[in-house]
Amino acid sequence: MIQDIPLRRIHHVRFFVGNARQSAYFYRNAFGFEIAAYKGLETGSQTEAGYVMRQGNITLVLESPLRAGHPEAGRLQLHGDGVRDVALEVDDVALSYQLAVERGAVGVTPPTTITDDHGSVTFASIKAYGDTTHSFVNHDHYTGVFAPGYAPLDPDRYRKPAVGCGLEAIDHIVGNVEEGKMDEWVGFYERILGFSQLVHFDEKDISTEYTALMSKVVQGGNGRIKFPLNEPAEGRKKSQIEEYLEFYGGPGVQHIAMGTKNILQTVRQLRANDVNFLRVPQTYYDALPDRVGEIDEDFKEIAELGILVDRDDEGYLLQIFTAPVEDRPTVFFEIIERHGSRSFGKGNFKALFEAIEREQERRGTL
């Protein structure tokens, strides 16, 4: 019997960006994240600046190089701003790394422990799709703000707290891979990390008149960690996955879905903060009551805010997708509220991807 890697949850998502200070300002003022910790020249970091952003149980880490000779500075030219690492909290970093490498994972950073006056943090990392990595991390013996090298931000930087938007947890993280590579990466997660396949969508499920894609969802950590993996399928025009792969320069994280318990309130606040969302036609909402049946929310308000709704055998969900948050059409976010449903909005795929195609047409990339 294969020994399980004891995965707890997604601990944090680490972005590599051109200007971490400006990115932190954006995530603070647009999405309502508070800056929990900082590293830079003032804290003794000579190579990177970093900001730890927190809201609910979501932690984003924004890092950028301080010098041209940074070993990963080239990824900014290749990708633009994007996700560098998805960190997984584990019981035992050394064991997790050992098992992953024994099963065929490519090691990037061997088990390493760093310390300061607040205790110790242990981490290690392996390669995933493209140049994305997964870190194994354990903070059980650390009482500081995030990790050694980070310190609380100077309180003079911001004189009032961030306005939270009710975002509570990472629901899932979606990766885009090249055509023909999806099954390979599904196998990676099953073989290396002990994930299981939750659901499969093919080109019949996810297609429009012009484009199509295929997707499989794997999950681990007793269902607490979910990674949908997308690949393009043959279509008449360039799909959103092909567009992403072209502008990102290869495989990578496409979007992060963040859960809320009140999507109406969350989306109202995000819109007030000038976060841009994809819109679907009014005809979608005309048919919505008959398609999904009775829900707790008001259909008129859902339509006004542009929220999508879908139902399965276990309940229903509400979801909405931002426009890309970079100049390149790459990374975006999903806001999701679940009422029993554990699916991913299959009934919304056609309307959503037609909305994405309208944006692609505006960009001249369809």
Image (tube, rainbow, N blue to C red):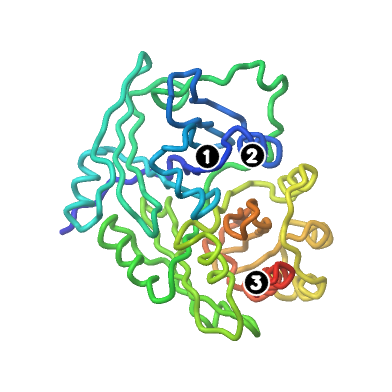
Lateral position of residue 227 relative to residue 236, left or right: left
Residue designated by label 1:
60
Badge 3 amino acid? Thr
- Please tell me how crowded label 2 is: few (under 14), some (14-19), or many (20+) other residues with Cα within 10 Å: some
List x then y, in percent, for residue 250.
45, 63
Give the residue drawn at x 39%, y 76%: 180
Which of the image's four quarters has the C terminus? bottom right
Element at label 2: helix
Q: Tell me where residue 188 sits by quadrant.
A: bottom left
User: Which of the numbered marks, if any, corresponds to residue 365?
Assistant: 3
Q: Tell me where residue 109 sits by quadrant.
A: top left
Badge 2 amino acid? Tyr
Element at label 1: strand
Relative height, residue 166 to residue 259 (above, below):
above
List x then y, in percent, for residue 287.
77, 76
Residue designated by label 2:
27
